[in-house]
Image (cartoon, rainbow, N blue to C red):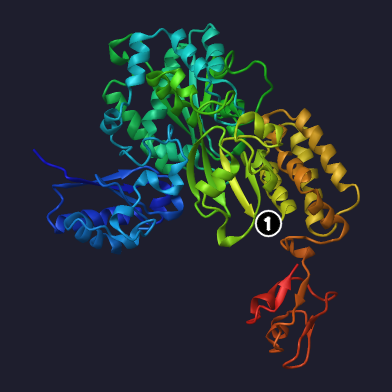
């Protein structure tokens, strides 16, 4: 019998793959074969570990040694020193300790210390393309328990008592949603997993599908049993090829083992799952537009009621939850609602997965208990702001969320607290901004996204967001007028009250939140024709400081001859001629030109 003395876990998530993890994995295989260790050391390709900033990641068990930014040329040293001689390669550790006793384990690294990984528990720990590894850590036990020992209503009651709320943005109680679908009488019902993750900077669902697809399939099957459905769809955007590949493998393996398909576990319960690839329209994240797309129609929202639980896919009762919601279900069934509700706050139970992006040192994926503060996420887990800059704001909830200032860093991250602050949980995108960020420009960026993604069906969203974007563009170009702020607020309120779907109703949020917390920046743009952050080029003022040595390089680079001065003396910029191209600033070897 083959004796495996060590496991080499190589991250195979999209982030690490793009950084070269596949080449690292192949080099491990070559080196182990060459050194005669391939029979006693097993290489495992896992899903995303979450610590994306420091990939490709390699963890060696049983020690749990965590190597960062591993390149193919580093592999020979790891094999020779660590796997052959038992010596840690300290230069590749996240922290370089003075002694081996100080080497932190995987869970002791600051990035992971305050996390509570329920949804991401298996991501980075198992091979997502081997169903046996999922089963070995308790996979499909929840499905077996539900369909062989529990009545459908008992399953729903357990989900209700857990306090699980939808992780796709709205935060609607999951058990109640299942109850509505179960109460609908029909010869056919559907379960849909919404994996149409379209928020800029968001990759939570992608990572779960890539790293632990069976957990989502199991959650969908349990939902199917609870509401009386025998068929499900996973709607996933085509831009996620690795997630789609691993989902297909997972579905095929589950069917071969009788865990999906007909008469699961020898019972009368049957459940089949299909994959529907979306074309990338952001509006298809809205449930009625998503169902229209599955049916082969243009993805456009429709008025509600009727709600999907009554009349959904092809007019049949349908339950829709997102990836993260379904990924919570199995643990609730196996460990109980009381265990699950012990995490989080009174009204926001469990954990939430966030994608950390922007001006933050530790970009990546983090799962934290509800109720943690924004400060803990950004500074303890995220490692603070890049380049030693000051924190300015965080955009939470994607393009439909809000921007929160420094004064809100100690805000509890839960559904109700975020809404009261003018933001929302959303699907979990978290974009951090530093002192060099223009908040008017940020609002314009997110509104430009939602405006371009509007399906155009309803006038408030189609025309209202366009008018708001025109005003913001004018402001950032120095053409802002008195009354623009009030007009933006008026338009925003009307769009929120009258738009057809959630995309339109939440589209003004970035504008309203930046007006609430950074109104002075809007006023500076309009009244003083000045961008405090120096980001808006048409409002920028270039100035030559006393550091100027009079070399004349800036003058030679200026395309409109706006710079004059004598050799070896300070030059000056004629602001009436300056076209604000920045060529002078880029050319100055003495950093004597500032932009403000």
Secondary structure at badge 1 equals: loop
Image position, residue 390 (x, y; %): 64, 57
Image position, residue 279 (x, y; %): 53, 39
The number of discs equals: 1
Image position, residue 59 (x, y; %): 31, 49
Placement of 569 over or under 344, stated as above or below? below
Residue at 44% in and 16% down: 224
What quarter of the picture does the N terminus occupy? Answer: top left
Does residue 441 appear to the left or right of 266 in the view shown? right
Residue at 26% in and 57% down: 88
Tell me, yes or no, if residue 150 can be seen here.
yes
Q: Tell which residue pokes out farthest to the right in this image.
A: 482
What quarter of the picture does the C terminus occupy? Answer: bottom right
Tell me, yes or no, if residue 238 can be seen here.
no
Does residue 199 appear to the left or right of 536 in the view shown? left
Image position, residue 49 (x, y; %): 40, 44
Q: Tell which residue pokes out farthest to the bottom in this image.
A: 567
User: Which residue in the protein does label 1 denote?
Assistant: 437
The residue nearer to you, when weighing 555 against 312, is 555
């Amino acid at each position: 019998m083959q004796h495996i003395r060590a496991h080499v876990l190589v991250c195979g998530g999209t982030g690490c793959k793009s950084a070269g993890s596949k080449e690292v994995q192949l080099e491990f295989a070559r080196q182990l074969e060459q050194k005669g260790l391939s029979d006693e050391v097993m290489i495992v390709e896992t899903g995303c570990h979450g610590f994306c900033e420091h990939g490709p990641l390699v963890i060696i068990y049983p020690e749990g040694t965590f190597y960062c930014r591993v390149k193919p040329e580093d592999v020979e040293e790891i094999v020779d020193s660590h796997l052959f001689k038992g010596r840690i390669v300290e230069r590749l550790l996240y922290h370089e300790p003075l002694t081996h006793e100080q080497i932190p384990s995987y869970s002791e690294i600051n990035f992971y210390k305050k996390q509570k990984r329920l949804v991401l528990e298996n991501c980075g720990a198992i091979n997502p393309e081997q169903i046996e590894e999922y089963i070995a850590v308790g996979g499909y036990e929840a499905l077996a328990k539900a369909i062989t020992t529990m009545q459908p209503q008992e399953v729903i009651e357990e989900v209700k008592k857990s306090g699980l709320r939808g992780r796709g943005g709205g935060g609607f109680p999951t058990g109640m949603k299942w109850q509505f679908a179960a109460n609908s009488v029909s010869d056919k019902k559907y379960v849909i997993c919404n994996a149409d993750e379209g928020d800029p900077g968001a990759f939570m669902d992608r990572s779960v599908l890539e790293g632990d697809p069976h957990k989502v399939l199991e959650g969908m099957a349990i939902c199917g049993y609870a509401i009386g459905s025998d068929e499900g769809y996973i709607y996933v955007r085509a831009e996620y090829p690795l997630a789609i590949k691993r989902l297909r493998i997972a579905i095929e393996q589950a069917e071969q083992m009788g865990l999906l398909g007909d008469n699961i576990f020898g019972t009368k319960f049957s459940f089949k799952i299909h994959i529907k690839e979306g074309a990338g329209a952001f509006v298809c994240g809205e449930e009625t537009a998503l169902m229209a797309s599955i049916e082969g129609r243009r993805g456009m929202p429709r008025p509600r009621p009727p709600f999907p639980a009554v009349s959904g896919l092809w007019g049949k009762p349908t339950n829709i939850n997102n990836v993260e919601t379904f990924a919570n279900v199995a643990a609730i069934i196996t460990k109980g609602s009381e265990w699950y509700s012990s995490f989080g706050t009174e009204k926001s139970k469990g954990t939430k997965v966030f994608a950390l992006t922007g001006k933050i040192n530790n970009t990546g994926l983090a799962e934290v208990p509800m109720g943690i503060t924004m400060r803990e996420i950004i500074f303890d887990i995220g490692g603070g702001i890049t380049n030693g800059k000051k924190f300015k704001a965080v955009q939470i909830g994607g393009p439909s969320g809000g921007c929160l200032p420094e004064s809100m860093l100690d805000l509890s991250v839960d559904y109700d607290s975020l809404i009261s602050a003018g933001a929302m949980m959303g699907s979990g995108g978290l974009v951090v901004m530093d002192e060099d960020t223009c908040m008017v420009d940020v609002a314009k960026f997110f509104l430009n996204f939602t405006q371009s993604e509007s399906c155009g069906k309803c006038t408030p969203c189609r025309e209202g967001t366009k008018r708001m974007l025109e005003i913001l563009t004018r402001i950032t170009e120095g053409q802002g007028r008195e009354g623009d702020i009030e007009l933006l607020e008026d338009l925003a309120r009307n769009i929120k009250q009258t738009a057809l779907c959630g995309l339109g109703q939440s589209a003004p949020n970035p504008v309203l939140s930046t007006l609430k917390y950074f109104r002075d920046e809007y006023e500076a743009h309009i009244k003083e024709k000045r961008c405090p952050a120096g980001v808006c080029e048409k409002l920028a003022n270039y100035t030559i400081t006393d550091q100027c040595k009079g070399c004349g390089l800036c003058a030679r680079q200026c395309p409109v001859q706006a710079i004059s001065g004598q050799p070896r003396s300070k030059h000056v910029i004629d602001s009436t001629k300056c076209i604000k191209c920045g060529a002078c600033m880029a050319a100055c070897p003495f950093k004597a030109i500032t932009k403000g």
